[in-house]
Image (spheres, grey):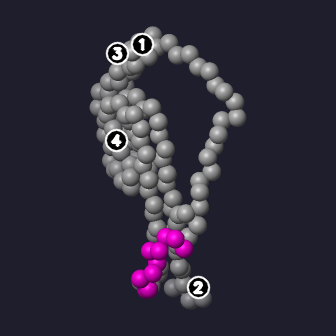
Amino acid sequence: MCPNERTSTVQSVKVNDIGYASSLFVGDLRYFAPVSLVFAVQREISRFSGSEGDLSKFSTFWRPIPELLPDEDVRMRVVNVDPVIRAGTVRVTSISSSSLVQFGELRGICAESRVKNIREILTGLPLK
């Protein structure tokens, strides 16, 4: 084990739900790159033409995501007094849309989630 490597121990983990390109990972990862493309159409009257799923019509799915570049160098020195990271009970309600809950080392992550919601609500109808 290298001087800065650490071991993670967790007494127990409870996750209610994992979905949409997400993960619960126990152990070390070099790189994690989840991608979630979500297109949701909600209509009061179920009427579909069959062409709703063409994602190229929506810039949400093809527009480049701006890359955030650091504007200054950061130098860091880490001294881990204890080589073990200890956690008791971890409770997670939900992991969703290109997310990660991880116990261990992660060297890099590039997560992408693009969501387009369309809601067609009827207007002009009398209230009941």
List the residue tagged with mark 1: 3
Answer whether residue 49 is magenta in the image. Answer: yes
Magenta stretch, main secondary structure, is loop
Amino acid at the residue labelled 4? Leu
On the image, the x and y values in percent for residue 110 come to 49, 44
Asked if residue 80 is positioned above or below residue 94 in the image, the reply reads above
Spatial CA distance of label 1 from label 2 is 65 Å
Give me the C-alpha separation between circle 1 and circle 4.
26 Å
Question: CB under 8 Å between callouts 2 and 4?
Answer: no
Residue 24 is situated, as x and y percent measured from the top left of the image, at 34, 41
The residue that appears at 52% across and 16% down in the rendered structure is 78
Crowd band around label 2 with a 10 angstrom C-alpha radius: few (<14), some (14–19), many (20+)? few
In the rendered view, does 14 fall on the left or right side of 32? left
Q: Mark 2 points at which residue?
A: 123
Which residue is tagged 3? 1
Q: What stretch is highlighted in magenta?
A: 47-57
What residue would you read off at disc 4?
A: 24
Hey, what amino acid is under mark 3? Met
| Few, some or many residues within 10 Å of mark 3 (<14, 14–19, 20+) | few
Q: In 3D space, how far apart are the residues under numbered discs 1 and 3 (Cα atoms)?
A: 7 Å
Asked whether the residues under the numbered discs 3 and 4 touch, taking CB atoms below 8 Å apart as contact, a structural biologist would say no
Question: Which mark is nearer the camera, 1 or 4?
Answer: 1
Relative to residue 81, is residue 53 depicted above or below? below
